[in-house]
Image (cartoon, rainbow, N blue to C red):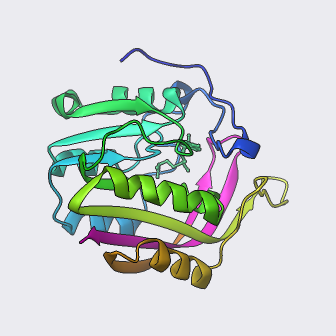
Amino acid sequence: MRKITKPCESKESKYIFSEGINYFKTGNISIWGSGDKKTLDVLKRIKIKGKWLNLAAGDGRYNLYLLKKVDFVIVSDIDKGALSKLWHTTPLKYRHKLDTKIFDINNKFPFHDNLFDGVFCTGVLHLFPKKILRKIVSEIDRILKPKGRVIIDFATNIKRTLPNGKLLVFDSEPLYSLSEAKEILKKLFKNYRIKMYESKFVEDVKKSNPPYVMNCKFIILIADKK
Ligand SMILES: C[S@@+](CC[C@H](N)C(=O)[O-])C[C@H]1O[C@@H](n2cnc3c(N)ncnc32)[C@H](O)[C@@H]1O
C-alpha cells in the first residue's frame, strides 16, 4: 500500500468523524495512545480465531493484538491515511494476513453475509445516535457468521478539554451516560450472549485535530452470536 498523506476532512453532519490530519506526521505510535489496560487484558486472554474485521480501525492502536491471534484481519476506516499508516507500521511478518477496506460505517458494509468470525470496533460507536447505531449493529450482525464474536467498546460520560480549558463537543454527538449505554447495548445485542466490563480512560490526545484531553468511562462488550 502506498503512503497516503492527504488528510480526510471530518463531516460531522454526515457522521464522519475523521481527524483531518496527515497520519505520517504523527510518529509510529497510534494517535490514540498504546491502548486501554482493560481492553488489552481482554484482547490478551480472549480466545479468537479465523477472519476478523477491525471496523473504524484508525491507525491501528489494537490491531497487532488481533493479528497475533487470528488468521486474517481486514481493517476498515473512512480515512485512507489512517489505514495507510496502520499498514506501514505493521511488522512485515504480519502483512500477509492484513488487508484494508475504505468505507463509511453509515452505509451498507461492502462484505457478503456471514463472512467474518469476529468484528472488533473501538473508540467510535459512542459518536452515533441510536437510529444509526441500530443500522451499524445490524450490518455487523449480517456479516458475522453464526457463533461469531463481537468485541466493541462504547465511551460514556465524555469530557474533552481543549488546551484553553473549554470543552469540545462534536455536532450531533449524543453524549450517552453509562446506564443509558448499557441498556442500549443490551437491546442491540439481545440475540447474543453478552458480557460487559467497565473501564475509565484519560488520555492526552496531543496529535488529534484539535488536541484535547479525553476523559470518559466506557464499556467493553463481548457478544457471542447464537
Ligand atoms: C477515535 S478513532 C478510533 C480508532 C481505533 N478504532 C482505535 O480504537 O484506536 C475513530 C475512527 O473512526 C473513523 N471514523 C469516523 N467516522 C467514520 C465513518 N463514518 N465511517 C468509517 N470510519 C469512521 C475515524 O476516521 C477514526 O479512525
Identify the image quadrant of residue 159: bottom right
The question of residue 174 being in magenta is answered with no
> Is residue 104 shown left or right of residue 76?
right
Q: Which residues are magenta?
A: 202-226
- Residue at 19% from the left image edge and 34% from the top image edge: 97
Direction top: furthest residue: 2
158, above or below 54, in the image:
below
> Is residue 130 shown left or right of residue 121?
right
Task: Say if residue 174 shows up in the picture.
Answer: yes
69, above or below 5, in the image:
below
- Residue at 53% from the left image edge and 62% from the top image edge: 134
Look at the image and tell me in which quarter the N terminus lies: top left
| Secondary structure, magenta segment, majority class | strand
34, above or below 158, in the image:
above
Residue 215, horizontal then vertical, whole percent: 63, 67
The question of residue 208 being in magenta is answered with yes
Residue 56, horizontal then vertical, whole percent: 47, 45
> Is residue 77 shown left or right of residue 144?
right
Q: Nearer the viewer, residue 96 or 26?
A: 96
- Residue at 18% from the left image edge and 28% from the top image edge: 96
Q: Nearer the viewer, residue 74 or 141?
A: 141
Identify the image quadrant of residue 167: bottom right
Residue 201, horizontal then vertical, whole percent: 54, 68
106, above or below 224, in the image:
above
Look at the image and tell me in which quarter the C terminus lies: bottom left
Residue 24, horizontal then vertical, whole percent: 51, 25
